[in-house]
Amino acid sequence: MTDPFQWKLAGRCYKLGHDVPHPGGVVPARIIVGRHFDAKDIVPHLFEETDPGFHERCRPGDIIVAGRNFGMGPKMNGYIAMQALGLGLVCESMPFLAYRAAVGCGLRVMSDCVNVLEMCETGDELEVDFRDGFFVNRTRNIQREYPPVPDNLLELIELGGNTGWLKQWWAAQQGDAARA
Amino acid sequence: MGSTAVEKTLAVKSGMASVKPGDVVYPQPDFVMIHDGVVMGAKRELDALGIDRLAAPDKVVMVTDHDVIYGSSRAAERGAYNREAARRWGVKNFFDVGRGGHGHVFPMETGMLLPGMFYFDNDRHSTNAGAIGAFGFRMGTEISRVLATGTNWVMVPKTVRLTIKGRLAPGVHARDVGFRIAALLESGELAADLDYRVLEYAGELDQFDLAARTALCSSPTEMRAYGVFVPPSAAVLAHAKAKAQRPYTPIFPDADAQYDADLDLDVSALQPQVAKPGGVQHSVDLSTVAGTRIDHVFLGSCGSSFFEDMQSAAAILDGRKLAPHVRMFVAPGSEQSTQRMAREGVLQIFLEAGAVMLPAGCGPCNDAVIGPVHSGEVSISTAANNNFGRFGAKDAQLYLGSPATVAASAVAGVIADPREIK
């Protein structure tokens, strides 16, 4: 039996500002243009242009906290890397198609977290439960409640995003066909 | 509390009494559209998972509109792949080369897409469905899940209402309205964020025919609207009734619907607009850029390729020649339009003026597969957008205008006001 999916992450805050674009701000544009979708090809380049070596310093459970308009564009590349590294993403807002891309990659993500940038600094110890929206900053003793992952999207994220979900769905279809 | 058009549509298609913005639903589409550029990616993705059949092949509509005449061996290979994919998937509604035209245009002409319908599409210009009072939602690469399972999750978007006041002056086109809206959204004079919103038009809409309504859908889409909705007029409903291929029920917003923003725009004093290079939001009165020398003209795209758009440009070109240094490409939205242009003498006007006719479809506006611009050149077109590099060299200067404006400019050799071509 596999471990139950961890909806609650506990780790360090990695704080970014407002209007971080996907190309350049999250991963270099060449990763997007080159259509790299394999996590191992993208991970070394996550935040490369603003913070080289990030992927070696981050740990599973760490939480990226961003401001408004994070990850402009319906690009998946950066979210694939974040998911593979076991990170979570909390932001004040992101364009909807960026949010959709993040969910489609199976990333634990909460958008519309008003003023969350004021609640933490890089390095703070955070706990975020993406299933009920509880945000706790252990370092500063702050608690907030934000809009959680919608119930209808929990399974999609638990299964690792679109590909994982489709894989499971197809296996279930095959099982049904075999039983019929 | 009442519902906006998109809330009502998603409720009906999801089998629910009502929905509100932020709800996640799984609507059952009337059909699913996928274009020639992405069939290969979707097929390979599903094949890799072993998924060898579609949920409802009869609902799937494949269109060849992005790369119609194969300017490369790679394009020819993709065309062959797509035909084999259609055969293996059992897709009968395959509008291949020369069989339909632009997927966001011909279904409204032929009565495939009708008021009140909802469909999934891989492409974001499916917002055009709003012209006939329907919705088409972009899924991007997630169209593969729709193909396999029949649906996908949709978060109900918020709605922004824009009430049009006044009537357009002669020589001013619905595309000009769209360009103006984009500029006003950018400046904040229209105070709304269209990201993942539906822009629902209201007000004096009877002045806009189906072609003009389609033009009204174009620029808001570039401003990141996820859907556009124009409540069908009596004329649009009559068209739908005459052409309908299947039953349908028109949907209208409730009078007490709640809007994310409620705006209005008086169009009575609007002048022809031109979008300066870099995006539709850089639109200005044409007079401020009149006289700019041009090299390249394109008439067509999802925003301006109905027969009426062609006719509007032809009225300017009639009996005239393109300026000697200008080349002009014309891509009607459908094979049906091309045939009607031939029947009614419109085609002859373009040919005699010196324009080059392209097959129905996207024309240069898809990644410059045909008729692109070269470095340093200046173009004016009715393309969906004029982002740098949209159809050719990144340092080319791409302007946008209405069909009449691009025709007037083609004749003058410089950006020109269609009202001044005598």
Image: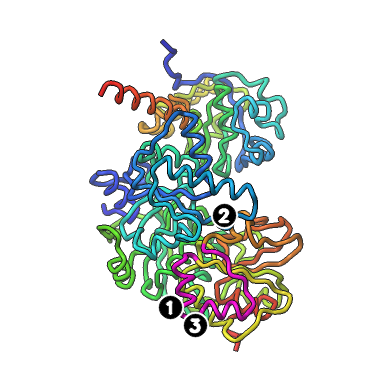
**Mark 2 — residue?**
B67
Question: How far apart in space, not on screen, are marks 1 and 2 (Cα)?
Answer: 38 Å
Q: Find the magenta span and give its range.
A: B333-360
Q: Are marks 1 and 2 on the same chain?
A: yes
Q: Amino acid at mark 1?
A: Arg
Compared across the picture, whether A143 is left or right of B24 comes to right
> Mark 1 or mark 2: which is in front?
2
**Mark 3 — residue?**
B170
Q: Are marks 1 and 2 in contact (CB under 8 Å)?
A: no
Asked whether B214 or B325 is in front, the reply is B325
Q: Amino acid at mark 2?
A: Asp
Q: Residue furthest bottom?
A: B422
Q: Which badge, 3 or 2, comes first in the chain's sequence?
A: 2
Q: Is residue A154 above or below residue B185?
A: above
Chain at tag 3: B
**Mark 1 — residue?**
B167
Residue B186 on image: x %, y %: 57, 59
Q: Are marks 1 and 3 on the same chain?
A: yes
Which picture quadrant has residue B71?
bottom right
Image point (67%, 56%), residue name: B388
